[in-house]
Image (tube, helix red, strand yellow):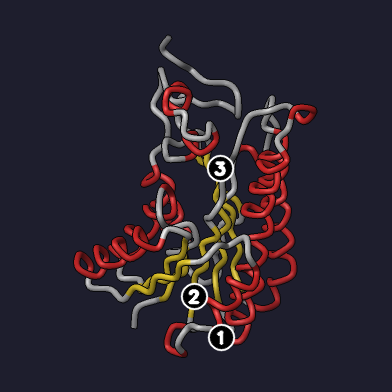
């Protein structure tokens, strides 16, 4: 019987790549996101290509009642989830705190922190009931270092780092693994969202060096799930070779 893996934010970037990698390795998938058509198209693609079962759940992870309703709606055979990938997240804006846009702050806090909590709260009782499970939280180098004008985004990813540690402490007695995977610069929709659709500004972020690709991170996420039962990767930081820290790059100008 295939393992069941639930991936949040599966419509693009790391989440979509994780869906492909896990399907390729014969995991049945629950994929979630807000863009229903993209989810349904991805679902059909994975079923056709890899012969796995896929359930697509379209909801806003920022809304706890939607999260709860989606999980409650799962048929019994889909509740034997073994892996939860808390991937949904975003950065919006690059303002200083004194010039901050409140709506940007709320989107980041509601998605990156509260959404992760809502989903974890809904799925962890299933893990505990099953006596096993693996939570993988997608963090960021922004959760290890603070950089100029990254304030609230960095704060949310530091929160993911802290919540990952807290989960590990509180779930160790339940035989549940908890891992954080924290990428550096990665070329996805990330910068396009941060710059609110300004593709010229987004493209500049990746000029002069080779950033990570979504598949690089997805392959690493899959790797941490393949280890023996007695082995857990607590924290994995993945950087492009050209990136030494959050702000230090070797760029060919």
**Residue 30 drawn at (x, y percent):** 42, 71
Left or right: 114 as drawn, with respect to 179:
right
Tag of residue 237: 3
Q: For this rendering, which residue is in front, 170 or 122?
A: 122
Where is mark 2, residue-wise?
Answer: 82
State the residue at coordinates (41%, 20%).
Answer: 207
Crowding at label 2, few (<14), some or many (≥20) Cα neighbours within 10 Å? many
**Residue 214 drawn at (x, y percent):** 40, 44
Residue furthest bottom in the image: 76
**Contact? badges 1 and 3 (CB < 8 Å):** no
What is the spatial separation of the Cα atoms under label 2 and label 1, in whole angstroms? 9 Å
State the residue at coordinates (49%, 34%).
Answer: 191
**Contact? badges 2 and 1 (CB < 8 Å):** yes
Tell me which label, 1 or 3, sits earlier in the chain.
1
Answer above or below: position of 6 versus 185.
below
Q: Secondary structure at mark 1?
A: helix
Where is mark 1, residue-wise?
Answer: 130
What is the spatial separation of the Cα atoms under label 1 and label 3, in whole angstroms? 30 Å
Answer above or below: position of 200 versus 156.
above
Q: Secondary structure at mark 2?
A: strand
Tell me which label, 2 or 1, sits earlier in the chain.
2
Quadrant in the picture for residue 29: bottom left
State the residue at coordinates (58%, 58%).
Answer: 179
Crowding at label 3, few (<14), some or many (≥20) Cα neighbours within 10 Å? some
Q: Quadrant of the N terminus?
A: bottom left
**Residue 112 drawn at (x, y percent):** 63, 52
Quadrant in the picture for residue 104: top right
């Amino acid at each position: 019987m295939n393992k069941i893996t639930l991936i949040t934010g599966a419509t693009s970037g790391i989440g979509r790549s994780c869906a492909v990698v896990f399907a390729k390795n014969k995991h049945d998938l629950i994929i979630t996101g807000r863009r229903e058509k993209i989810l349904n198209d991805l679902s059909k693609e994975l079923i056709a290509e890899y012969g796995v079962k896929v359930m697509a759940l379209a909801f806003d992870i920022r809304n706890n009642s939607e999260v709860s309703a989606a999980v409650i709606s799962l048929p019994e055979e889909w509740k034997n989830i073994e892996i939860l990938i808390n991937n949904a997240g975003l950065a919006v804006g690059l303002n200083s705190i004194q010039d901050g846009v409140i709506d940007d702050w709320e989107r980041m806090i509601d998605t990156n922190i509260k959404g992760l909590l809502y989903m974890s709260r809904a799925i962890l009782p299933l893990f505990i009931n099953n006596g096993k499970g693996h939570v993988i939280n997608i963090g960021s180098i922004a959760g290890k270092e603070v950089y100029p004008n990254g304030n609230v985004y960095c704060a949310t990813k530091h929160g993911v780092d802290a919540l990952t540690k807290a989960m590990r402490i509180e779930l160790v007695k339940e035989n549940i693994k908890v891992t954080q995977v924290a990428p550096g610069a990665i070329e996805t929709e990330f910068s396009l969202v941060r710059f609110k659709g300004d593709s010229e500004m987004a493209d500049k972020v990746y000029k002069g060096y080779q950033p990570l690709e979504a598949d690089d991170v997805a392959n690493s996420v899959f790797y941490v799930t393949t280890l023996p039962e007695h082995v857990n990767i607590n924290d994995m930081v993945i950087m492009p070779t050209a990136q030494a820290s959050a702000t230090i790059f070797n760029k060919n100008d």
